[in-house]
Image (cartoon, rainbow, N blue to C red):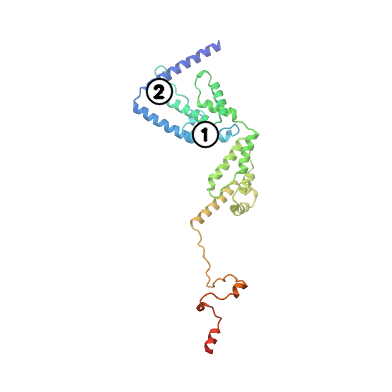
Amino acid sequence: MWNHQRSLLDLHDFLFGSLATYLCADALFLQNQPSNLIAASQTMAAQSETRKQVKSIPWLDGTNYHQWSFRITAGLRTLDLWLVTGAVAPLYQACPVPANAAAPTAEECARIAAWDSANERSIGFLSEAMEKAITRQVQNTAETAAGTSNQVTAQHWWDQTSTLYDITTPATIYRIFVQIWEWRMSPNKPPQGQLDHLLMLYNQLEAQGQTLLTLTRVMTLLAALPRDWQQLVTHQVLNQPAVANITWAVVVAAIGHHWDGLQAHKKHPQTKVNKLSAVQCKGPNQTLQQQMAPYQGSLSKVPQKKGKGKAHARGA
């Protein structure tokens, strides 16, 4: 009996939902052509921005959920799609319901159409950032979660992805740890952005329930500095009176101070002074054959020993 009543209720919701969708589509079709052209232009711009954001997000491969979710959440927020995808109540925006499903107003139809567009864009955005096998799996579980409502939402996709892949595995922890171990700071880029990336890796490790000691983080960072930096920065950090004073903030400050000094030196380089000398450089040593060979140059240029010329003049 209960199943029969539930089926009737689902059928009622489906019929009235379909009727409202049909009426809204009909009302929107009757809008003037300039508005349709503007909407089409906005849609193309939104699709272009979506493709741009997808390229910056790593694919979900089943082992990198935390890295993937961090990046794709930022992308959804940039595209103004987060509120229809992964936001929780009261921020989550469900599909608007018209006051009278049989006669929705033009304003209600516009809100429903805008929500449908955002929902479809979000689903497309999520599916494009997954491997094909994972996309099919998430799609199947999302359709199952939607049930008889006949409307698969981006929230279904988000929740099912989290259920399937937001799990702690040894492979995930190892992958994050390897990224931390292989991380190196570039001497040609500002350090702040690079440090933010390293902190992101530490946060991903903490999200997996693994936390590194502060001293371990500090020593890992010092060992990853460029060789030309290590002596000065390490000496400044290790000059603390106690181990407890060696914190992340102390290391970051030392790195920032060193970077600022390098930039100031580039703006005002020291002028190099070349040493001048009036002493002529000695020519190459001659071989015995060269010394015994007759002089080939002009006689006026033959060098004479000091005093020999004066004696010769007196004798003359």
Q: Residue furthest top?
A: 1
The residue tagged with tag 2: helix, strand or loop?
A: helix
- Quarter containing the N terminus: top right
The residue at which mark 1 appears reads as: 73
Say the numbered circle drawn on residue 89: none
Q: Residue furthest bottom?
A: 315
Relative to the observer, which residue lies in front, 294 or 67?
294
Residue 129 versus residue 186 in the image, above or below: above
The residue tagged with tag 1: helix, strand or loop?
A: helix
Residue 159 in which image quadrant: top right
What crowding class fits label 1: few (fewer than 14 Cα within 10 Å), some (14-19), or many (20 or more)?
A: some
Cα gap from disc 1 to disc 2, whole angstroms: 28 Å
Rendering coords of residue 189 (x, y %): 53, 48
Question: Is residue 307 visible in this depiction of the protein?
Answer: no
Rendering coords of residue 237 (x, y %): 61, 51
Rendering coords of residue 177 (x, y %): 63, 40
What crowding class fits label 2: few (fewer than 14 Cα within 10 Å), some (14-19), or many (20 or more)?
A: many
Residue 282 versus residue 82 in the image, above or below: below
Rendering coords of residue 210 (x, y %): 64, 37
Q: Amino acid at mark 1?
A: Thr
Relative to the observer, which residue lies in front, 256 or 38?
38
Question: Is residue 4 visible in this depiction of the protein?
Answer: yes
Say the numbered circle drawn on residue 109: 2
For the residues bearing labels 1 and 2, Cβ distance under 8 angstroms: no
Residue 143 in which image quadrant: top right
What residue lies at 40% left-to-right and 25% top-to-bottom?
Answer: 110
Q: Amino acid at mark 2?
A: Cys
Relative to the observer, which residue lies in front, 216 or 113?
113
